[in-house]
Amino acid sequence: MTISIPILCRKYQHILILSTIGLLIIIITIFGIPTSKITTSISITKKTATGTPSRIEREFKLSIQTPSTSLYSTKEMIAHIEKELQLQIDKDNFNPPEALSQAYYITTSTNSSIFFDIYFDTKDDTLFNNKALYRLRQRFKNQNIFASYLNDPLNTKSFPSRMEYQTKINRTHIDAGLSETEETRFEFRKESTPFNENNLPPNQPWDITTYITYLQRGKFKQYHLLPSQKLMAYLQKKDPNIQKIALSPSVAVITERERIHLNVPSPWGSGPNPEQAFIISLDTFRVYDGKKYLQFLSQRKPFAPKLLGTSQEIEIEFERNTSTKLDTLIQKQTDQYEKNTFIKNQFLQNQQEIQEHITQALKSIKIDIIPQNNSKYSQAHRFKK
């Protein structure tokens, strides 16, 4: 019996369709879902957006010079910093604002935490050129969990502890290494708006490709993202002709962080750690091409893409819950205005003193540091050149 070509084509049409679908699945698995046409429109500035309210981040950044870092491990360096600060507290050389009756005390994190950041930008580097940043951040409790995640992102024991979108804009330099930046977040945890006990965030696993598309659109389900809204409003002020932006992965930055907290009981603290006044971080970060690193994740290859660069820095942050509370009280212009302003200035003086003590402590063990005026994204972006 002879079968005509049209009948043969119809007979095997379903096979061709299934084969095509299979090929598309393979392409998506290897290269990720195509996202180049996804944009965030300026119209988001007219929408009701949600997320963690913007706060001012006040911090010193000190860059550790590369030749010196081989002398000591990060844990040895952070221990030396802790020892020096405790010495100054014991000598009564370093005291909190006069309105507080107790001295500072130190707490440390026992494990190094890991931040996995994907920074986004346009093809012509609109964010970099305007000193802004937008990143997807995953937080891991330690290096072992992150290593397990790279091997198998679906392993329940390797899930990140937190994930969020963050934008930073309006960066202002106050002094060498000292800056103020407006930071806005959308966090996938029940403690942060719009989520709560009655409106829980999505369960893990958080497929990174899917969550990248939410960031690129500026919208998660029915929620317009507050970080996207803030970013678009900022960019339009810089360039009124901007109507939309197409964001794609620029760099991937993996940060290993050691941390010290300076604490003191005060009426201005809030959150899970209300006595924190300053956060001192020692960061070692590695920089990769963003798109290539995401391909590495999706393919689960045994080797990461080429390392573009690495650096170390110290951050000394005036804890945001405390500083935001003082900012709010000062802005109300009450009869306590002068008192609250004086207290805030005393905290800022303490921040300056911490920077000086840390600089001297590291200098005593032959580690040179210099003020760093660039954000992590600006530093990482320069490794791409």
Image (spheres, rainbow, N blue to C red):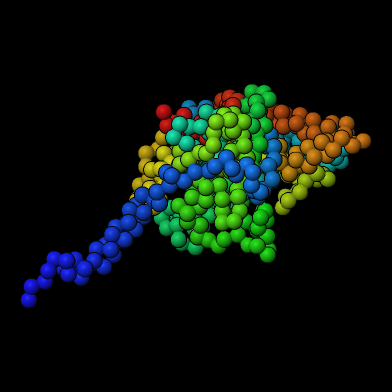
Q: Position of residue 316 (x, y in %)?
A: 66, 35
Q: Position of residue 224 (x, y in %)?
A: 60, 50
Give the residue at the far bottom of this rendering.
1
- Whether 61 is drawn above or below 262: the answer is above
Q: Can I make out residue 142 in this image?
A: no
Q: Can I make out residue 273 in this image?
A: yes
Q: Is residue 214 left or right of residue 275?
A: left
Residue shown at the point (68%, 65%) measured from the top left? 198
Residue 307: image quadrant is top left
Q: Position of residue 162 (x, y in %)?
A: 58, 53
Give the residue at the far right of this rendering.
335
Residue shown at the point (87%, 35%) measured from the top left? 333
Residue shown at the point (50%, 60%) measured from the top left? 205
Q: Nearer the viewer, residue 23 or 113?
A: 23
Give the residue at the far left of this rendering.
1
Residue shown at the point (69%, 37%) measured from the top left? 56
Q: Quadrant of the C terminus?
A: top left
- Whether 122 is drawn above or below 293: the answer is above
Q: Is residue 131 left or right of residue 51?
A: left
Q: Position of residue 234 (x, y in %)?
A: 61, 34
